[in-house]
Image: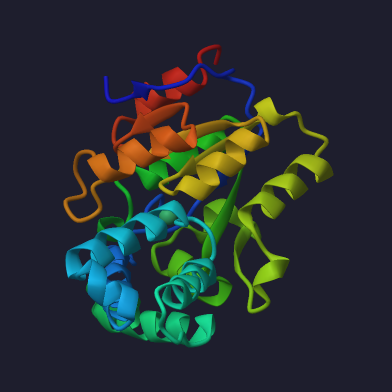
């Protein structure tokens, strides 16, 4: 059994699904944590308080708050960095400056992937969480409408969804972070789906690898599937993710969607 049961929840009545993008469907940005964590740790080290803590403590501290904010728009991680720098006696830059620098570093890392997807030299399936196409098709087969809600800036999400060929499953329902960050959140997307379709929470299912979307889905009364993929290996569980997804309230934890028949029989027991 590749499904780990964490919390009871009502199954089989789902009509709408909210899926996170990076780490839940797409692996195009795999390794972003290895860019953000050391970058933020370096910035913390430039403060008087950070120097006192030492590099390892700065690194662990950065990793923890980045993880707890994963799933929110990137700017929130940068706002938190800005606040921590002030707290540690440093003079912070504007959060947007941290976001721009981080994103430039990340784009340098994933540039080959984007080019390879564009020119056809990379098979898009290899940059998805295993079984993603099967999952999306399975949801559609059960008349569940999938929505994609990402904390990455919307133009990038739209482009990367096209490159890994998942756009047809979502149609127009792909949402990402907006320039004015207060106008978008995953909670807002979820709230809108529920309101516009007169749903009860139990008709909603969410898939995510981040703390935020799991909490948002549970808060709305939905069923939360924590996807704890080991992104670098594309095989097995990432223990760090697993532990935090359980803490966020995930109903079940899965490594990926490879065992799609098992997942389908579990989520739709009466079908
Ligand atoms: Mg994610």
**In the rendered image, which quarter is residue 270 located in?**
top right
Q: Can residue 253 be seen?
A: yes
Q: Nearer the viewer, residue 97 or 259?
A: 97
Q: Nearer the viewer, residue 85 or 165?
A: 85
Residue visible at 39% across and 63% down? Answer: 164
> Position of 35 compared to 138: left or right?
left
Residue visible at 29% across and 68% down? Answer: 37
Q: Is residue 220 above or below residue 90?
A: above
Residue 126, how many percent across, how many down? Answer: 25, 58
Instruction: Please name the colour scheme applied to the rendered image.
Output: rainbow
Residue 260, how many percent across, how many down? Answer: 36, 31
Residue 200, how many percent across, how many down? Answer: 75, 28
The C terminus - image quarter: top right
Q: Nearer the viewer, residue 230 or 143?
A: 230
Residue visible at 47% across and 38% down? Answer: 248
Residue visible at 47% across and 64% down? Answer: 161
Looking at the rendering, the quadrant in which ligand 1 lies is bottom left
Residue that extends furthest to the top in the rendered view of this protein: 270
Residue 259, how many percent across, how many down? Answer: 30, 30
Q: Can residue 115 be seen?
A: no
């Amino acid at each position: 059994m590749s499904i780990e049961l964490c919390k009871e929840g009502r199954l089989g009545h789902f009509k709408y699904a909210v899926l996170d993008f990076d780490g839940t469907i797409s692996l195009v940005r795999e390794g972003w944590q290895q860019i953000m964590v050391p970058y933020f740790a370096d910035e913390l080290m430039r403060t008087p308080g950070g120097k006192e803590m030492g590099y390892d403590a700065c690194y662990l501290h950065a990793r923890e708050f980045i993880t707890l904010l994963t799933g929110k728009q990137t700017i929130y991680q940068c706002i938190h960095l800005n606040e921590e720098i002030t707290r540690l006696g440093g003079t912070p830059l504007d959060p947007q400056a941290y976001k721009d620098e981080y994103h430039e570093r990340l784009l340098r890392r994933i540039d080959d992937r984007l080019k390879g997807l564009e020119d056809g030299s990379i098979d898009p399936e290899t940059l998805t969480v295993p079984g993603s196409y099967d999952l999306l098709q399975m949801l559609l087969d059960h008349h569940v409408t999938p929505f994609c809600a990402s904390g990455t800036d919307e133009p990038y999400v739209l482009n990367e969804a096209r490159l890994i060929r998942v756009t047809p499953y979502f149609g127009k329902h792909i949402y990402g972070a907006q320039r004015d960050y207060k106008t978008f959140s995953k909670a807002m997307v979820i709230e809108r789906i529920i309101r516009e379709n007169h749903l009860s929470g139990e008709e909603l299912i969410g898939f995510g690898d981040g703390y935020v979307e799991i909490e948002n889905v549970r808060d709305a009364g939905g069923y939360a599937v924590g996807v704890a993929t080991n992104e670098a290996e594309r095989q097995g569980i990432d223990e760090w993710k697993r532990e935090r997804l359980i803490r966020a309230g995930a109903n079940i934890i899965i490594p990926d969607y490879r065992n799609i028949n098992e997942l389908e029989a579990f989520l739709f027991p009466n079908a």
